[in-house]
Image: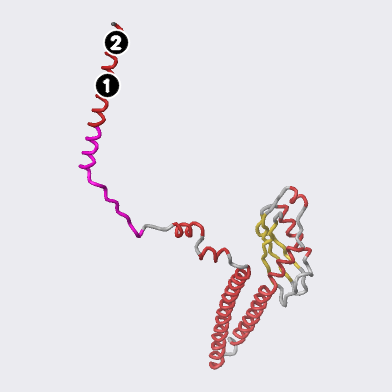
Amino acid sequence: MKNTHLFSLLLSLLFHSILAASIYYVVSNISTTKKQEKTPPKKIALDLKNLHTKTEVEKKTTTPPPQKQKAQQKPLKQIKKKKTIKKSVHHKKMIKKKKKLLKKRVQKRKTLKKKVTQVEKKGIKKNTTPLKSQLKKHHTHSKKHIQKEQYKQNNLYAIQQMIKENLYYPRKARRKKITGEVVVTFTLLKNGEIKDIKVVSSDAKILSRAAIKTIQGLSQKLPKPSTSIHLKLPINYTLK
């Protein structure tokens, strides 16, 4: 009797629990459907301008801009041409400056000549002699200056190359890895001799001594000038 009573209780509990679950499920479904009916559908706005196809995106990522490709694919000839153009522009500027200087000198001569003619007209011969001597001095000075400038233009690069080829670099300095620049001044005579070698600035004493030695070794080897010339050159000491 007891067993039958328990079995009936269990059956009633199961039945009631299933009923409660089904009621809860139905009620919850009804509430969700009502909410869905109340809430209006969301509108989605698309900007057709901002849309991009896969092919356009891939093109942007893969292919670099044409300007960069051109910059990368510049041949060596174009670079050399640019360098030559820069050199020619610099050369033209130097020629313009020299022409201006020559014009100024010509004007000075003309003014001096005018003074001489004025004094001669007045009949004062004593004052004419110093003016004539001034003209001669000015003429000789301008000639020498032009010759010096021409020599520098034509031979400075060659002199620098000769210094590089005949550079004296002491072993001690190389061992200790001493590098730097030494600026040297010296006078080059007509016969090619070098005199009055002086160090203007130097990064190390050992390098300044070496620089003086290299220039002493270039005596009678450098191109000879028409007049004695004073040169100022930098000598670089670098380890490759």
Residue drawn where x is 25% and y is 47% of the image: 41
User: If you read the primary sequence from the N terminus, does the residue marked by circle 1 or circle 2 appear first?
Assistant: 2
Secondary structure of residue under mark 2: helix
Query: From the viewer's perspective, is residue 142 above or below residue 35?
Result: below
Residue 107 bears which disc, if any?
none
Residue 6 bears which disc, if any?
2
Q: How far across and how far down the image is residue 115, in percent?
A: 54, 87
Residue drawn where x is 67% and y is 73% of the image: 152
Q: Which of 191 and 84 is in front in this view?
A: 84
Q: How far across and how far down the image is residue 184, in percent?
A: 69, 62
Residue 57 found in image quarter: bottom left
Which image quarter holds the C terminus?
A: bottom right
Q: How far across and how far down the image is residue 180, in percent?
A: 67, 55
Query: From the viewer's perspective, is residue 157 above or below residue 98?
Result: above
Q: What residue type is labelled 2?
A: Leu
How crowded is the residue under tag 2: few (<14 C-alpha within 10 Å), some, or many (20+)?
Answer: few
Q: Nearer the viewer, residue 194 or 154?
A: 154
Q: Which amino acid does label 1 sit on?
A: Ser
Which image quarter holds the N terminus?
A: top left
Residue drawn where x is 50% and y is 63% of the image: 65
Magenta segment: 28-49
Q: Is residue 179 left or right of residue 193?
A: left
Residue position marked by numbered label 1 in the rendering: 17
Secondary structure of residue under mark 1: helix
